[in-house]
Amino acid sequence: MNDFDVLILGSGLAGQSLALRLAAHRRVALVTKKTLEDSASGWAQGGIAAVLDAADSIESHIQDTLTAGAGLCNEAATRFVVENSRNAIEWLIEQGVHFTRDDASMLGYHLTREGGHSHRRVIHVADATGAAVQETLTDRVRHHPSIKIFERHIAIDLITGAKLGKPQLGCMGAYVLDIETDRVLTFSATHTILATGGAGKVYLYTTNPDTATGDGIAMAWRAGCRVANMEFVQFHPTCLYHPQAKSFLISEAVRGEGGLLRLPDGTRFMPKHDQRAELAPRDIVARAIDFQMKKRGLDCVFLDISHKPASFLMEHFPTIHARCLEFGIDLTRDPIPVVPAAHYTCGGVVTDLNARTDLPGLYAIGESACTGLHGANRLASNSLLECLVFAAAAAKDILAAKPRRASKLPQWDESRVTDADEEIVISHNWDELRRFMWDYVGIVRTNKRLERALHRIRLLEREIDDYYANFRVSNDLIELRNLVLTAHLIVRCAQRRKESRGLHFSRDYPELLPQPRDTLLRPTRGG
């Protein structure tokens, strides 16, 4: 048995920043499905929203967040995050992150503006902020003696007191599959943290890495935790449209710096959809693009920033420029073909302001959590900020508690299973799930589409449960099991919302209800 004070599942910004804050005082295990570098955090281009400029204010950032969240943000959580935004950025600078400088600014750093923001408040590292931050933290994590790293390991399920007949003990650790050896390891920990990211891979088209399979959300649900607002899936309006350009995002900052959305004939269309035009929040822009594509039978629309000086574009968007050039697109001269794609899971495991879930000893931070910050639609560049603020809050709460002695936990039981006979079942079900979720539970929804999706999900669940009960676990099976459960939670939440709000748009309920309410799902305990 692997015995630690703290078990962190996930190695994005949330997981790594928490590990670094705890490592001087606790024995930390950091478990990640691929390598430390593989996470959605590392793919984030735009930056981190924070109140840093004297012309900006905490109240303004809070109001922008509440407006984007369509009335559903938790005001206490929003204020908590925004008030701690400067501390979060200062901590990253202390760790060695070199944000883009601007000597003309009193602050000394360049701040950009993104859709939904009333001020320039997004601090960044050119157009590859996530990669730069992740690289800096990863180097520190790898060299810290109190952090033990388990790469190419995937959590199967949480170990709870309820499963052992001692519900008062809460979460006691997790079973983890070593992907390279196919051995299941038992991890015991006083505190377990879900920092596993979102569930973008439940959709056919996504900006997320392959690791975004809803693992933490699914494990928490099976362990008896509440889940909320899963119907709010943010579709990023501008993903590069090219057969070879898998999951490449064209940053919000391109529109923030003057990029215009155009039809193939060059006509702009956003002013007809919203007075803020290209700077409208993501849900509005994504729906507008979806509307134009369906109305005109288009494969994509175009994002054009070629009217800006080439030197400006090369300085601010070097990563995007280089990637587009690989596909024969020069953004200094050509419009970029773009389509919406699943980007961010606004709902997740319900937590408090200390990142605690319903299960004692279990925390959730980052995209797997539902803190109340994002409401019905995430404001651009609030996600990395949320990771940092709640990692700090979780660390403070964990350090205030006394580490307990490890409990003796039962080993994983494989006595009644055999090797899988046909892996094709898993790959077929994976493809089927992602296609019907895209078709039926995408940007625009109807009652009929949701019913069709739920019918297919239930069929898949029966097949997967049977497969899981009879065959040895594998990485693909664990991810598929989690994805199907996460899809089920998304559909159930969508069916409960009898209105159109934020990221959830229903043709059957196009109006907004007067009283905003969270969609809260409660599992039966003890599973």
Image (tube, rainbow, N blue to C red):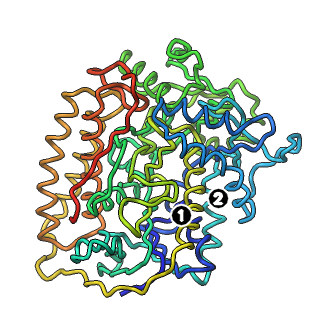
Q: Is residue 241 visible?
A: no
Q: Residue at x 23, y 61 (%)?
A: 525
**Residue type at mark 1?**
Ala
Towards the viewer: 526 or 138: 526
Residue 390: x percent and y percent?
A: 55, 57
Q: Tell me the quarter of the picture where residue 155 sits.
A: bottom left
Q: How many numbered marks appear?
A: 2
Left-right relation of 203 to 372: left
Q: Residue at x 52, y 71 (%)?
A: 398
* Residue behind mark 2: 133
Residue that extends furthest to the front in the rendered view of this protein? 168
Residue type (three-letter) at the residue carrying disc 2: Val
Query: Would you name the residue on which mark 1 appears?
Result: 394
Name the residue: 26% across, 61% down: 222
Q: SS class of the residue under badge 1?
A: helix
Camera-side mark, 1 or 2: 1
Is residue 309 depicted above or below 347 in this figure?
A: above
Residue 384 appears left or right of 118:
left
> Is residue 385 shown to the viewer in this render?
yes
